[in-house]
Image (spheres, grey):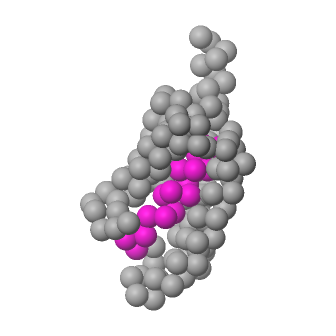
Amino acid sequence: MGIGYIKGGGTIAAGITCLIIYLLQKYQLLGGNITLIITAVVITLIGIYTGNKVEPLWGKDSYRVVIDEVAGMLVTLLFTKLTVLTLISGFVLFRFFDMVKPLYIKRMEKLPGGTGVMMDDILAGVYANLVLHVVIILSNYYL
């Protein structure tokens, strides 16, 4: 949709993903975690394919490719109760892990072609998901 051409396209793509998920949830059009898992897998496979196709033209992990942020954001939100608070918290956590790239996330970028493009964001989403679940568990415990 051209989001990759906008400054901060990755952040915008992750934010739009949250907004779409929120609206689908609000209007009961989201089929739950199975739908999110299938969507994340399909988007990841499309991202690997397209990443392989555009890399020779645009270079490794071009800023114009933002499908990886969509997949990472979906992974971040798996198995959570989708509230405004969890969406915002998940968004912040995902962007943190995606930008800072700790704990082997940076190494994932070195994978060849579209796999490297997608897997660093998938791993950032996994870490964000784990932290989000810890925060949810602790907030339920202490509140």
Q: Which of these two is toward me, 92 or 111?
A: 92
Residue 43 in picture, x, y percent from top left: 59, 64
In the rendered view, tell whether residue 110 sits above or below residue 30. below
- In the displayed orientation, state which residue is furthest to the left: 7
**Horizontal side of residue 46 vs 13, given as left or right:** right
The answer to which quarter of the image holds residue 47 is bottom right
- Asked whether 100 or 10 is in front, the reply is 10
Asked if 122 appears above or below 87 in the picture, the reply is: below
Q: Which residue is drawn at 64% across and 35% down?
A: 80
35 left or right, relative to 6: right
Expressed as whole percent of the image width and height from the top left, the position of residue 55 reads 47, 83
Q: In which quarter of the image is the N terminus?
A: bottom left
Q: Where is residue 11 in the image (x, y as percent from the top left)?
A: 38, 52
Q: Name the residue: 56% across, 58% down.
A: 71
The answer to which of 19 and 58 lies nearer the viewer is 19
Q: Residue 60's x, y, as percent?
A: 45, 78
**Residue lying furthest bottom:** 56
Q: Is residue 65 left or right of residue 105?
A: left
Taking depth in this image into account, of 29 and 63 the one nearest to the observer is 29
Which secondary structure type mostly characterizes the magenta part of the structure? helix
Q: Residue furthest right?
A: 34
Q: Which stretch did the figure color magenta?
A: 62-78
Instruction: Tell me if residue 69 is in the magenta stretch.
Output: yes
Residue 130 appears in the rendering: yes
| Furthest residue in direction top, as rendered | 143
Q: Which quarter of the figure is the C terminus placed in? A: top right
For image coordinates 48% across by 58% down, the residue present is: 69
